[in-house]
Amino acid sequence: MSVLQEIVAGLGVPNFKVLVPEIIILITAFLVFAIELLTRARFAITVVTAVGLFLAAIPTLTMEQGDITFYGLYIVDSFSLTFKFFLILSTFFVVIVLRPYLEAKNTYYGEYYYLILFSLLGMMMMVSAPNLITFYMGIELASISIYILAGMFKKDYLSKEGAFKYLILGGTGTAVISYGIALVYGRTGSFDFATIANTINSDNLDVGAVAGIVILIIGLALKASSVPFHFWTPDSYQGAPTPITAFMAVAAKISVFAVILRVMVEAFPFAYEVWNTGWALLAAASMIFGNFVALRQENVKRMLAYSSIAHSGYILAAMAAPTGAAFTALIFYSLVYIFMGLGGFIFLSAMERQHGWNNNINDFRGLAKRSPVLALFMLIFMFSMLGIPPTVGFFGKLGVFIALINSDIWWLAVVLVVMSIVSAGYYLRVVIYMYMHEPKSKAKVELSVGEAFTLAFMAVFILILGIYPTVFWDISQILSSLLIAGVGR
């Protein structure tokens, strides 16, 4: 060891080498801020943001795993690196479709780009958290940036209303999480997941421990827009600029699912009888409410918002069965939801730029005759969300269903199947309007390069994963095993 290395080791300097993706995102955000401030060059802002995201994604695939830095507050393992890669990928697709949308709406602000990057940075912190403090800082950084993003349509009442509701209810969720963390700390004397796992087990579950876990679940359920803590979701999703809605519905949601899994498995593995019942009830309520209310929606953007609540239920249902297979199913469904969710919302974003399109179900009349390729993309997204083979959405639901059956949680498995059937009512309605009605207009649909690439990529990937889901399933299985192996490390 060199003298310099000895000095660095003696000082206890954090290992910044494992933070390369986060550092690249942070530098990119400041670069974009400077470009916006000094030149306002829109093309340069988009390019710098996209290049920064591309460069940040590379080390998530190549760096070594297993490091813990910042004095035990930050972990870089396969679980966090995989989720970081997909979070960056999701953000990249949002960024490349954002500028045409904002310019068409006459609401372009350079602030969108660096706020998205700061939010992404918070999400990356969340999935790397082995400690309640890191998790809290990450969720705050991500949430505050999204509150602002949701309300950037300054002259639009729905945007301001949605952002206000999100701010109030999101702030409430953060406060609830704070109370939960305080109770857990009071009971265990530690914020560290491993120490908490070694302190709380099924034999010493007193009022303090149970209250801490339950309050944490409520706060996390609010962030995941689970029923009955979902009230901010439909208005916020409908009022926000649609590419930002895609970012909220996919990247923000996936990071919350990842952190829920890590917190429950690593911090409270021996108190699973408390949290598996809680998540089962929240999942069932989300599936039932989300699907039945989505049936009544005439606005497809709002319908997809309620649909995302139902998908939260499908994914969180896996938490009812605390087994390796269930955790694998949760990770698999979370990852494949990225492609379905982004595809659906970016389709709406692209169509909103067309004259007279306002996402009403009637706007979809005869789309297959005006633009057969676009209609085919939307059909694939709808079929995948519904869970029809050979799309990957089928395997997402199948994995959760099998995990529930293997754990003898039949009632929740039946709810999942029945609600999937109910969801056909609104997903197939969109398909029927596209293929079985005459078009309202014969105007040509025009897409930007980014929109065309994103929609084609999502649709093709959904089909490839549906035919060959093994790779994603194996990745999910490895990540699940890693989480379980890390319990009480």
Image: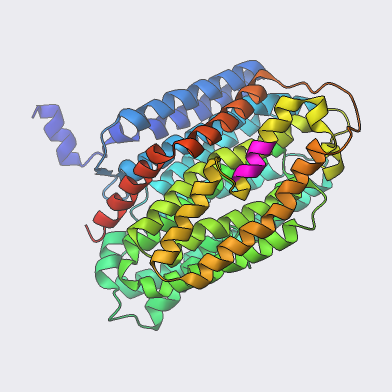
Residue 217 percent across, percent down from the top left: 49, 67
Magenta part mainly helix, strand or loop? Answer: helix
Task: Please state the extent of the stretch shown in magenta in the rendering.
Answer: 379-384
Position of 395 relative to 55 (above/below): below
Q: Is residue 125 above or below residue 265?
A: above
Hey, which quadrant is residue 311 in on the image?
Answer: bottom right
* Direction from residue 358 to residue 170 in the image, left or right: left
Location of residue 189 with respect to 357 vertically, above or below:
below
Q: Nearer the viewer, residue 352 or 50?
A: 352
Q: Quadrant of residue 16?
A: top left
Q: Is residue 44 visible?
A: yes
Residue at 46 percent across and 27 percent down: it is 27
Q: Seen in the image, is 49 located left or right of residue 22? A: right
Q: Is residue 41 visible?
A: no
Where the N terminus falls, by quadrant? Answer: top left
Residue closer to the observer: 102 or 330: 330
Left of 111 or right of it: where is 72? left
Q: Position of residue 208 (x, y in %)?
A: 39, 79
Which residue: 52% across, 53% down? 397
In percent of width and height, residue 12 lies at: 21, 42
